[in-house]
Amino acid sequence: MIEIKNVSKWFGEFQVLADVNEVVQRGQKVVICGPSGSGKSTLLRCINGLEPYQKGEIVVDGVSLSDPKTNLYKLREKLGMVFQRFELYPHMTVLRNITLAPMKVRKKSRPEAEKKAMELLERVGIPDKAGAYPANLSGGQQQRVAIARALAMEPACMMFDEPTSALDPEMIQEVLEVMIGLAKEGMTMLVVTHEMGFAREVADEIIFMDAGRIVERGRGDDFFKNPKSQRTKDFLGQILK
Amino acid sequence: MLTYKFDWGVLWRQPYGEWLLQGLWLTIQLGALAWVIALSLGILFGTLRSVRFWPLRIIGALYVEIFRNIPFLVQLFFWFYAGPMLLGKTLQFKINQISGLNYYIAIFGLGLYTASRVAEHVRAGFASIGHGQYDAVLSTGMTRLQMYWYVMIPHALRLIIPPLTTEFLTIFKNSAVAMTIGVAETTFMSYKIDEQTFHGLEATTGAMAIYLVLGMTVVKLMDRIESRFRIPGLMSR
Ligand SMILES: Nc1ncnc2c1ncn2[C@@H]1O[C@H](COP(=O)(O)OP(=O)(O)OP(=O)(O)O)[C@@H](O)[C@H]1O
Ligand SMILES: [Mg+2]
């Protein structure tokens, strides 16, 4: 589904990504963790073409992002993305937030798009909020709307960039539950998070990034119990405290 | 010394009262039609200034710098005297035959000038939208054009309603400059009454009252628009 081959990226002199290699198979769930500034967000942004990279290649569903002929807009339809700060459109209702892209990009009719949107709101547990505006929702509810908005495009893979780190503790669980539900349905997922409970439960693979490199990769308990590098040990020590 | 005898009757006696009303009607037309141009071009050039593709940004910046920095009166004279010449001999002749040419030039000139100011507000509106919003829209597969048209422009416009109210108000006030090219709007008419009756003080006071009422109406209208389009949860000013 997603192949990242030897990708390097620089912001000026500063190297953000250094020879990153990773393959995400269809249906796989990969969790990325690592300290602030290690390049996790940048990696996700490179995968859906929001950021260019200077070296290597990223292939999504057989389509290379390095190819200048690639239609990035078409490609992004396959990749849903959820952001740390939700990024809902504050001047639109929840329903409109979700139906906009299906109507404009997929040219769905309004009733069709709204029917789908209501199903998704049902699924994330807030069908009664369809007419509300983002500012009138709690953080957890906003993030669930953001997930519904991404799902409305029926993506083949969902990418999450620290989806719970802007949330109050009591709201983290409601968002994680939606994500776990998605995982169980077989969605391909690439999740940047420090929620190690989530990682343990759903991840097929956990990646630890530091200074733009993938320092360590492992599976579930093994990753937590026997980290190979000292850097990973230190990091896990900090967040599992 | 002669004492000045007030005659407020010039404000409603015919034909003067009617002149003022005709002037008001023209002022409304100038302001409203120029505003349509100002808003459309202002949104266009303000957006151009904000896009990633630098040649478009330069076009936007050039427009704003040129129209914002030259006094409106000079711009108006330019369009009136030099504008038709820019179009070549035959067209110039045809254009000069259009009746009410000065009226069209006033609308056009006022619109182009005000557009540069609107463009600056629009740009400020975009700048206050967080960058994550752009990523979010693009991540749903929308094109940049769709992003600006469906999300960013409606969002930015809602953020800049207060400065837009000021511009809308100003466009009616600036429309008085159109008298210099012979458009018989409110100020023009008050001078004309003065010429005929020597009661310029009353006529000017009448014109002032007209601008005041017009301005207050504009503010009321914009207040309604603002409350209709207010972004829920955004702190009101
Ligand atoms: N547009 C940019 N220009 C220059 N440097 C940037 C830019 N965006 C990010 N960086 C830098 O790149 C590095 C990686 O950023 P990135 O956001 O990918 O980190 P991250 O792992 O997601 O961190 P966090 O956990 O804080 O979100 C950081 O040092 C950041 O300062
Ligand atoms: Mg990040």
Image (tube, coloured by chain):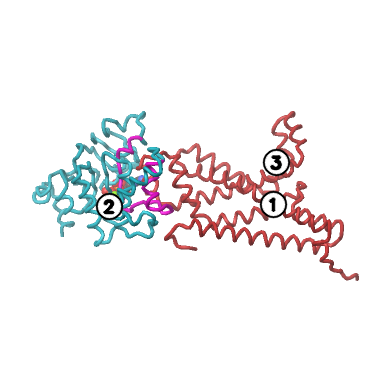
Task: State the CA–CA distance, disc 1 to disc 2.
Answer: 55 Å
> Amino acid type of disc 3?
Trp
Q: CA distance from mark 3 to mark 2?
A: 59 Å
Whether residue B151 is visible here, answered yes or no, is yes
Q: Which residue is mark 3?
A: B79
Q: Quadrant of residue A57?
A: top left
Q: Residue at x 46, y 38 (%)?
A: B53
Numbered mark located on residue B175 in the image: 1
- The residue indicated by pointer 2 is A124
**Toward which corner of the image does residue B231 lie, by quadrant?**
bottom left
Residue A80 located within the stretch drawn in magenta: yes
B57 to the left or right of A35: right
Is A96 situated left or right of A217 in this image? right
Q: Which chain is cyan?
A: A
Q: Give the vertical position of B52 relative to A130 (above or below).
A: above
Q: Amino acid at mark 1?
A: Ser
| Residue A233 percent location from the top left of the image | 13, 52
Q: Is residue A168 left or right of residue B108?
A: left
Element on which disc 2 rests:
loop
